[in-house]
Image: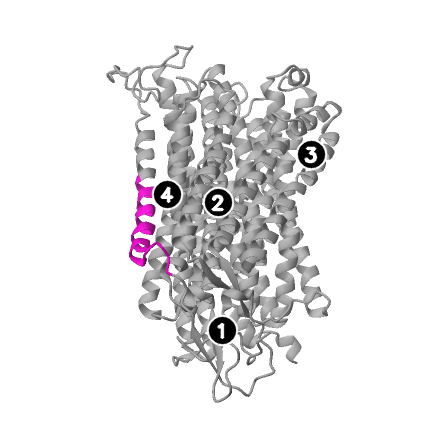
């Protein structure tokens, strides 16, 4: 073992002492790591590099491939949008129809002439409903973004002040954190560029969510109209619309990050340590906006949903999305601002943070030390290949195969996951062997660990396939095609109480396999490539983000399509088709949440490792009081956060229920369909409640790392992060799957597709009412608390990493008294 001075030298190379007899040289390729102790603190050390083998892919090729793949993704999304736009929202029957051979049928007449479905008034009514939903969603997001914009500016100032004060706002160069023999850019520069990166990430996140919402509200009525021609046509329209969002978000996130890196490099030059430390602000910006999007949107949608269901279905015994229900427009608006805009910002944040975590660790490994730009950009190359793979995968759903019957919908969506995972495995192999040296070193808590390119390939693959496993397990526990949900539905025979008991048990049980999958991913990836391996495993899970988002966005679009069909008075057969699309969409939404939670666990652990290294923590010892108090408090935070979001939904739903009851009781002719309800008041109730109620949970997440790091120090903060991660993942998976199972148990009874389901129905029966109560309880679990928890654990970790220099220099005030 070689002993050297007490600073972490992480270099791939031979070590020589000066003015002494040279130590025996040991090539790093023959060791697993170098352990540095304090025994030779009097010696000066010079490190000479043993160059890595060059990558097959040149720097120039890397600089071309990444932006080109991003542009291809954006162009493909625009093509999908153009194809969706060909579904006309005007009652124009003069279109020439000589194209019956076109299986996607954009310009052909209706395949079926059903009662009323070809009436021009139906088309006009669909357009009116679509406009109402779009205007409501746009109005809410603009209101939300005004408040979020204020937070963005204030928090950006805080980042600059906290990080700038590390060296007293000095403009002089400082010693590098990980190599004290080199000089790096001043702390003030890190403060300024971290602030810029934060704003870039925040703005990109907001735009991603907003564009997703606009695309969804553009496509919902078009999906309804296409359902008149057959379920296959409606499926293609909904899926293409989801693909617009998926590719636009994945490609724009990659492009903005790549441009930011190159612009920052103009100032930082060879100081890659400082460059990529500043880039972490990009992930912080993305996740902080996602938090408010998820919480605010989740409160909005569930307040409306609970109010509409409790009064409409249970008290008044009218169908879901009945136009007589005053909360129906607010409910459909909520699908777009919560499940689309919030979810888009959430997955963008996960992508940004996993990329930033990998880049930070790589910058202090041999990639960064030797300034190998291609190897450094390995995370971005994986994402670039992911866009191309997802493009090919999408064609299988929209062009290569045609859905003809309802039963094929679920399998078509499942095939998207399988095809993208298999193709991505091949893509990762290619990138790993042409974009990485044969062997290199990865920073591992003060030492350098030798890693081979095939090991990094396996790290990415283990994350990718773990994501698929989590997706399939989530499907098994939330789809009404399998026994767990059918058992929950059967429990409704004896009332709502047994339904709730069975649903909670299902949620707890559904945690087991995903946690084992995540645990195995962590063990394998850390064994091969330390924290960098965990970061790229998270990136592997998110590498098919475009397909994942397309599948996820498909669900709310189909849900809206069903609501529009009901409100427009279309035939029962049309509603059956949209219900089938919606039922599959519920399961895919649960799968999307599973991916988000699983990747959040890996991302948070990678960010946690980077924080521990940056804060100079030698070991995280849970037996020390400072760490243990942090651990137990951190494990409590997801429960506190969930309590706040659940109560917020309950408070907003209470106001909604009272308003819906008031309108039914005071508006003459409303139940008979002779009068029109006041939709605007219900939309306003949801908007006001969500804006007001999203602030306390957001403040809890944002302020916790700042308060703990400043007053209790980095050791206690490390405990808080670990506790929140371990606890939050379990609660998030359980809450999401419980809610998803209750929702699909209700739909199982409503559909009556099997003999067992028919014995529980029809709509309005006592088992159905019990199922509606379970679904209502599960709404805030699956759409507000559960999905928001993964942002909690990611955001606290990335915020701690960004503020780590300040906490390390000035934190722990209470222990210094």
Q: Is residue 182 left or right of residue 799?
A: left
SS class of the residue under badge 1? loop
Q: Which residue is mark 3?
A: 503
Q: Earlier in the sequence, mark 3 or mark 1?
A: 1
Per the model, the C-alpha gap separating discs 2 and 4 is 15 Å
Picture coordinates of residue 591, whole percent (x, y)? 55, 37
Per the model, the C-alpha gap separating discs 3 and 1 is 50 Å
Which stretch did the figure color magenta? 54-75
Per the model, the C-alpha gap separating discs 1 and 2 is 37 Å
- Predominant SS of the magenta segment: helix
The residue carrying pointer 4 sits among few (fewer than 14), some (14 to 19) or many (20 or more) residues within 10 Å by Cα, namely many
Front position among marks 2 and 4:
4
Picture coordinates of residue 37, whole percent (x, y)? 60, 78
Report the disc number at residue 342: 2
Q: In the rendered view, would you say 797 is above or below 178? A: above
Q: Quick check: marks 4 and 1 in contact, CB under 8 Å?
A: no
Front position among marks 3 and 1:
1
Residue 292 at least partly seen: no
Q: Is residue 728 left or right of residue 399?
A: right
Q: Which residue is mark 1?
A: 178
Q: Earlier in the sequence, mark 3 or mark 2?
A: 2
SS class of the residue under badge 2? helix
Report the disc number at residue 248: 4
Picture coordinates of residue 312, whole percent (x, y)? 58, 27
Q: Within the image, what quadrant is residue 190 found in?
A: bottom left
Per the model, the C-alpha gap separating discs 4 and 3 is 36 Å
Q: Quick check: marks 3 and 1 in contact, CB under 8 Å?
A: no
The residue carrying pointer 1 sits among few (fewer than 14), some (14 to 19) or many (20 or more) residues within 10 Å by Cα, namely some
Given residues 38 and 270, the one toward you in this image is 38
Picture coordinates of residue 521, whole percent (x, y)? 58, 49
């Amino acid at each position: 073992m070689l002993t050297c001075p007490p600073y972490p030298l992480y270099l791939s190379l031979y070590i020589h002492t000066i003015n002494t007899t040279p130590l025996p040289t040991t090539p790093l390729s023959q060791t697993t790591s170098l352990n540095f102790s304090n025994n030779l603190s009097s010696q000066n050390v010079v490190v000479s590099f043993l160059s890595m083998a060059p990558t097959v892919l040149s720097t120039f090729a890397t600089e071309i491939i990444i932006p080109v793949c991003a542009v291809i993704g954006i162009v493909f999304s625009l093509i999908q949008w153009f194809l969706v736009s060909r579904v006309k929202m005007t009652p124009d029957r003069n279109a020439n129809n000589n194209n019956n051979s076109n299986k996607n049928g954009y310009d052909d007449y209706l395949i079926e002439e059903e009662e009323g479905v070809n009436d021009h008034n139906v088309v006009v009514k669909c357009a009116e409903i679509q406009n109402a939903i779009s205007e409501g969603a746009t109005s809410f997001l603009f209101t939300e973004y005004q408040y979020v914009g204020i937070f963005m500016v204030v928090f950006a100032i805080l980042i600059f002040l906290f990080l700038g004060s590390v060296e007293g706002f000095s403009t002089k160069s400082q010693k590098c954190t990980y190599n004290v023999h080199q000089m790096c850019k001043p702390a003030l520069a890190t403060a300024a560029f971290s602030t810029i990166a934060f704003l870039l990430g925040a703005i990109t996140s907001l735009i991603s969510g907003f564009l997703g919402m606009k695309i969804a509200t553009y496509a919902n009525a078009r999906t309804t109209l296409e359902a008149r021609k057959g379920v296959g046509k409606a499926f293609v329209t909904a899926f293409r619309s989801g693909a617009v969002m998926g590719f636009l978000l994945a490609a724009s996130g990659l492009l903005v990050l790549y441009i930011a890196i190159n612009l920052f490099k103009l100032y930082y030059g060879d100081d890659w340590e400082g460059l990529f430390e500043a880039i972490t602000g990009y992930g912080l910006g993305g996740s902080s906006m996602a938090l408010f999007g998820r919480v605010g949107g989740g409160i909005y949608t569930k307040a409306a949903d609970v109010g509409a269901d409790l009064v409409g279905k249970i008290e008044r015994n009218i169908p879901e999305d009945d136009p007589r229900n005053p909360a129906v427009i607010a409910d459909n608006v909520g699908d777009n601002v919560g499940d689309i805009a919030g979810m888009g910002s959430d997955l963008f944040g996960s992508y940004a943070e996993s990329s930033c975590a990998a880049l930070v660790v790589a910058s202090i490994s041999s990639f960064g030390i030797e300034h190998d730009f291609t190897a450094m950009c390995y995370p971005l190359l994986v994402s670039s290949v992911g866009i191309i793979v997802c493009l090919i995968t999408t064609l299988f759903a929209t062009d290569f195969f045609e859905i003809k019957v309802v039963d094929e919908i679920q399998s078509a969506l499942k095939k998207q996951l399988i095809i993208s995972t298999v193709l991505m495995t091949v893509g990762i192999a290619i990138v790993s062997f042409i974009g990485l040296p044969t062997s290199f070193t990865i920073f591992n808590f003060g030492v350098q660990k030798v890693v081979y390119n095939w090991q990094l390939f396996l790290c990415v693959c283990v994350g990718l396939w773990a994501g698929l496993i989590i997706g399939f397990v989530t499907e098994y526990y939330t789809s009404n095609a399998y026994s767990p949900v059918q058992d929950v539905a059967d429990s409704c025979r004896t009332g709502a109480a047994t339904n709730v008991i069975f649903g909670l048990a299902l949620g707890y049980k559904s945690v087991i396999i995903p946690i084992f999958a995540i645990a195995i991913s962590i063990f394998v990836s850390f064994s091969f490539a330390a924290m960098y391996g965990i970061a790229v495993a998270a990136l592997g899970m998110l590498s098919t983000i475009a397909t994942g988002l397309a599948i996820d966005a498909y669900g709310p679009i189909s849900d809206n399509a069903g609501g529009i069909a009901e409100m427009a008075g279309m035939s029962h057969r049309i509603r059956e088709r949209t219900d089938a699309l919606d039922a599959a969409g519920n399961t895919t939404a649960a799968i999307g949440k599973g991916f988000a939670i699983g990747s959040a666990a890996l991302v948070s652990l990678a960010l946690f490792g980077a924080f521990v290294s940056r804060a100079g923590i030698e070991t995280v010892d849970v037996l020390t009081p400072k760490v243990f108090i942090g651990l137990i408090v951190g494990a409590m935070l997801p429960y506190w956060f969930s309590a706040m979001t659940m109560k917020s939904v309950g408070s907003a739903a209470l106001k909604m229920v009272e308003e819906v009851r008031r309108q039914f009781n005071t508006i003459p002719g409303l139940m008979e369909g002779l009068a029109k309800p006041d939709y605007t008041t219900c939309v306003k109730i949801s908007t006001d409640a969500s804006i007001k109620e999203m602030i306390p949970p957001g403040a809890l997440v944002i302020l916790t790392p700042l308060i703990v790091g400043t007053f209790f120090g980095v050791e206690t903060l490390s405990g808080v992060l670990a506790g929140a991660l371990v606890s939050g993942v379990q609660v998030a998976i359980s809450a999401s799957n419980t809610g998803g199972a209750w929702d699909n148990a209700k739909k199982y009874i409503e559909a009556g597709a099997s003999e067992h389901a028919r014995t529980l129905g029809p709509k309005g029966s006592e088992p159905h009412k019990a199922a509606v109560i379970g679904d209502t309880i599960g709404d805030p679990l699956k759409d507000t608390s559960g999905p928001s928890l993964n942002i909690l654990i990611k955001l606290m970790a990335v915020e701690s990493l960004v503020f780590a220099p300040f906490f390390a220099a000035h934190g722990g005030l209470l222990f210094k008294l």
